[in-house]
Amino acid sequence: MDISADLTAPCPPGDLLAWVDDLGRYPRWLTIVTSATPAPPIDGDAGPAWLVDLRGRLGPLARSKRLRMVRCESTGSRARFERREADGRSHAPWVLEASVTPMDDGSRLVMHLHYGGSFWGPVLERMLGDEIENSRPRLLACLAG
């Protein structure tokens, strides 16, 4: 599954990037992320890690998942997170990329999520589509203070 979304915000790019560069801030604007707490580093981590709890509901069906995500890239305009579990087992990949570009009247955020497993399937796509629409005004409210 691959899903992309964008947002235009009336703020400097650095302000917007600060909200997507730190997974610990996601629960404040993305309700599918119920918590994101710092995780202890392990050898080979490219950056900080978080334990991210995801929970989504579609009608009577609810799913939850805990992921260990590592920020493997962080620049002044881009952040990339990858799943990196510490249990030594093989897991489906999760990759989240965010890029922010300046615009005349603010900045533009483009986010892309890749999930390489089949456990959530079409349920995840539907939940994420709804969540993306609902998260835009929450993120803009966070940016406004």
Image: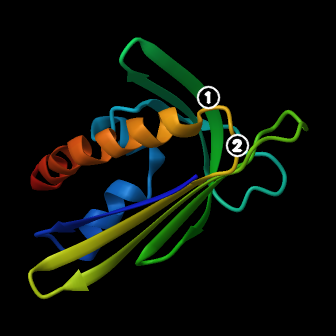
Residue 113, given in percent of the width and then of the height, sits at: 52, 56
Residue 92, given in percent of the width and then of the height, sits at: 75, 44
Residue 115, given in percent of the width and then of the height, sits at: 62, 49
Q: Amino acid at mark 2?
A: Gly
Image label count: 2
Residue nearest the viewer, comparing 135 with 35 = 135
**Residue 16 vertical placement versus 130 (above, below):** below
Q: Which residue is mark 2?
A: 117
Question: Looking at the image, which residue sits at the far right?
Answer: 88
Which dot marks residue 66? Answer: 1
Label 2: which secondary element: loop
Which dot marks residue 107? Answer: none
Taking the spot 56% from the left edge, 64% from the top edge, the residue there is: 80
Taking the spot 44% from the left edge, 52% from the top edge, the residue there is: 22
Residue 131, given in percent of the width and then of the height, sits at: 32, 40
Give me the C-alpha separation between circle 1 and circle 2.
Answer: 14 Å
Question: Looking at the image, which residue sits at the far bottom?
Answer: 104
Task: Specify few, some or many for label 1: CA neighbours under 10 Å numbering under 14, 14-19, or 20 or more.
Answer: some
139 lies left or right of 78: left
Question: Looking at the image, which residue sits at the far top?
Answer: 60
